[in-house]
Image: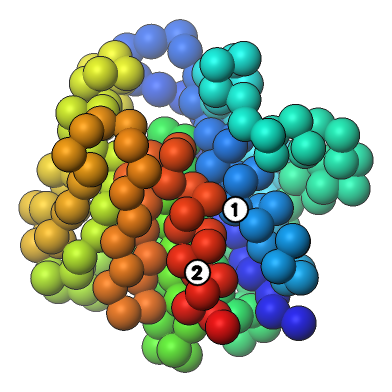
Amino acid sequence: MKKILMVLTSHSEMENTDSKTGVWLGEFTDPYYEFLDAGYTVKLVSPKGGRPPVDPMSELTENVTESNRRFQDDQQSKDAFSHTSPISQISASDYDAVFYPGGHGPIWDLATNNESGLLIHAFLDQGKPVAAVCHGPAALLSAENLKPGFLKGKVLSAFSDTEETLVGRSGNVPYLLETKLKEHGADVKTALVPFLSHVETDGLLITGQNPLSAGPVAKALIDLLK
């Protein structure tokens, strides 16, 4: 049975605003149930352990997905979400792939978390896929920090600068993710129209642009594992 590691943010604060962030719920639940329905087991971890913060906007009616509703009725999964293990306790050798959901949180904590960066390199060194969606690809910045040049030439997708501006949060983040990835030499590709699904696969790296891309990234990961 395939075992998937999902790494969630522990960060909730934003800059220049009282608004909170955290995990974008649908970017967790959409892939989570893709993996469970494919017969995989899923382990949830985060930098701090415990229950990750959830971006309140992702729980608004217009952003609720079918998987969100399924999650609300799934006590076992809610318990697992409330009791994530710290990343420090995890070894890549115990899992077949790793998936990083978004929400704005990762651009603060996972982007600078050395344990997460080491984990990404361990998965890739062992020939195992690394997947991320929306702001989840910020986790790749920690891998870049540990091995400068890691991102150079990598074909990725991530939440675009245009989308950040359109959701009104470009003034509440320390940097724009698309720009930051490009600064490190990544070839960032996005959909022609903002907020449409877009997925890129570059070897063992699978990345998606936005919340609508979360399920498709998970399906691409499942296809790769097959």
Q: Nearer the viewer, residue 222 or 142?
A: 222
**What count of labels does the image hold?**
2
Kind of residue sitting beneath label 2: Leu
Q: Is residue 132 left or right of residue 173?
A: right
Q: Quadrant of the C terminus?
A: bottom right
- Relative to residue 78, is residue 156 depicted above or below? below
Q: Secondary structure at mark 2?
A: helix
Q: Where's residue 75, x and y in %?
A: 90, 40
Q: Residue at x 61, y 46 (%)?
A: 30
Disc 1 packing (10 Å; few <14; some 14–19; many ≥20): many
Which residue is tagged 2? 221
The reply to whether residue 105 is in sight is no
Q: Where's residue 204, x and y in %?
A: 37, 78
Which residue is tagged 1? 31
Q: Residue at x 70, y 53 (%)?
A: 33
- Residue extending farthest to the top is 18
Residues at badges 2 and 1 in contact (C-beta under 8 Å)?
yes
- Relative to residue 34, is residue 51 depicted above or below? above
Kind of residue sitting beneath label 1: Pro
Q: Residue at x 53, y 50 (%)?
A: 215
Q: Where's residue 24, x and y in %?
A: 53, 34
Q: Residue at x 69, y 75 (%)?
A: 3
- Relative to residue 174, is residue 27 depicted above or below? below
Which quadrant would residue 197 be assigned to in this image? top left
Q: Nearer the viewer, residue 197 or 58?
A: 197
Q: Tell me how the rendering is colored.
A: rainbow
Q: Quadrant of the N terminus?
A: bottom right
Which quadrant would residue 87 be assigned to in this image? bottom right
Q: In terms of sequence position, does the residue under pointer 2 or pointer 1 come before the other? A: 1
Q: CA distance from mark 2 to mark 1?
A: 10 Å
